[in-house]
Amino acid sequence: MIQKFALILLVMLVLSACVGTQSMLVEDQPLKGINITIDPGHGATQAYDSSRIGQTGEREEWINLRVAKILSRKLSLAGANVLMTRTKDRDVSLGGRASMAIRHHSDLFVSIHHNSSANDPSIDLPIVYFYGSGDMNPASVDFAKILIDSMRAEMAFQQQQAGAVYSDHLIYSSGTSVLRNTIDDMPGVIGEGGFFTNPSGEGRLKSKAYNKLEAEIYYKAILEYFDRGTPSAICLLPDSLKYVDLLRSIEFELDDGFGNTFFIENSFKVLQGGVQIQSRWDSNSGILTATPNSSLEKSVSFQVFARNLQGNAIHPIPFTFLTKAGYEWYSHETWSTAFNEAEFLFSQAVQNNEVDILDSALHLYQLSLELQIAHPKARIAEEKILELLMMKQVLIEDDLSDKVKAQQSRIREYYPN
Ligand SMILES: [Zn+2]
């Protein structure tokens, strides 16, 4: 009896231990299933770059890598699938970093940098950059704000209150390469945790303990961001569709990040080619229904915006589809079918003087040349393009003389008699 009781007790102990371990696992792995790319900026620039260095010889790429490595370990322990774009002091191309992050299907891209000033060593503050305009990139801004707040609260800077979240368009008019090339797939930021050109900043950034603190701040910001849930939208068009019918409404299914449909009222917005179109939210079904605008473009792209009750925005990944015009355009597989249809439309355009027909003919002659360089009727196509441009100029009473001149010299230079 005692033995049996002992056995039951043992079984209960094992069971409770199992349950205990399981719940421990969930609590210890708050980032389970989440893909994160950590990008330690630069690498192996010592031989040729004398700007990325502090007064006592500490280099930016070394600090970036130390912080990134500590952060990466912490994230992995929390269950995240972490990709580091480099783990050694070596150079990786900017394009390579972005494509790695895309291949990793990242939910977040975090590029770790430290700042320098060529002419003012007194500057020492944190900056977090996002791509483009804040309105168009709300999820990146959400994360950037969490990060800058804890950087300012917990790290030491000479100008503690001056740190801020900024657009990367302040650095380059077209933004930074890594953020520009990942924006269509994931939210992302470039964090600049202080200035190594500031003597006391460099002193701090050299210390492993301070690197650890900085990594901890990134880690906590990432935890908080994902804890708020990452809301998402999917487009309910069938995959088999050849092109999108812009005469019909288009539906998006939204998730607030917790498998529910709780969003902030009036936070819904659908853009078509960057322009807001009419949309209607149904909280019961979780469906956002939008009314597209007609379009003469070959493709259209839609972006969905909404914010969940925890304050996180959907990252507005563009849904891009061929239009009917685009489908017809791309359905020409050989230069000759494109050229023959162009010839047919050319004769129509001459008879009818209609700009639409004229444009189609123009496009198809160009397509024939794109499909096959120097096809047997290439010169004829180039001359017809010139003729159509001149006809169009008369028809729309617009100045196309630059295009006409460019086409004339193209024929003269590339197709000498
Ligand atoms: Zn940098």
Image (cartoon, rainbow, N blue to C red):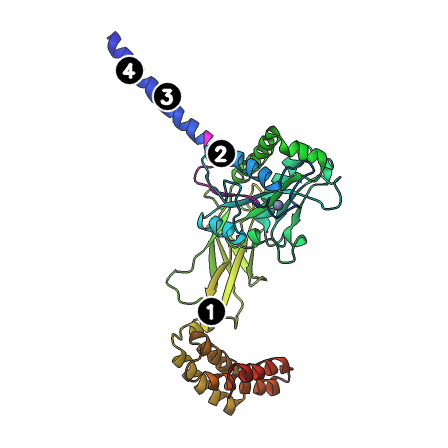
Secondary element at image label 2:
helix
Q: Which mark is residue 73?
A: 2
* Residue 316 visible somewhere in the drawing: no
Magenta residues, start to end: 28-41
Furthest-front residue in this view: 47
Type of the residue with mark 1: Thr
Type of the residue with mark 2: Arg
Q: Which quadrant of the structure image shows residue 191?
A: top right
- Mark 4 or mark 3: which comes first in sequence? 4
User: Picture coordinates of residue 328 (x, y %)?
Assistant: 43, 74
The residue positioned 46% from the left and 74% from the top of the image is 370
Instruction: Report if residue 32 lies within the magenta region.
Output: yes
Q: Name the mark nearer the viewer: 2 or 1.
A: 2
User: Picture coordinates of residue 53 (x, y %)?
Assistant: 65, 41
- The Cα atoms of the two marked residues, 4 and 3, are separated by 14 Å
Residue at numbered disc 3 = 17
Residue at numbered disc 4 = 8
- The Cα atoms of the two marked residues, 1 and 4, are separated by 68 Å
Secondary element at image label 3:
helix
Residue at numbered disc 1 = 323
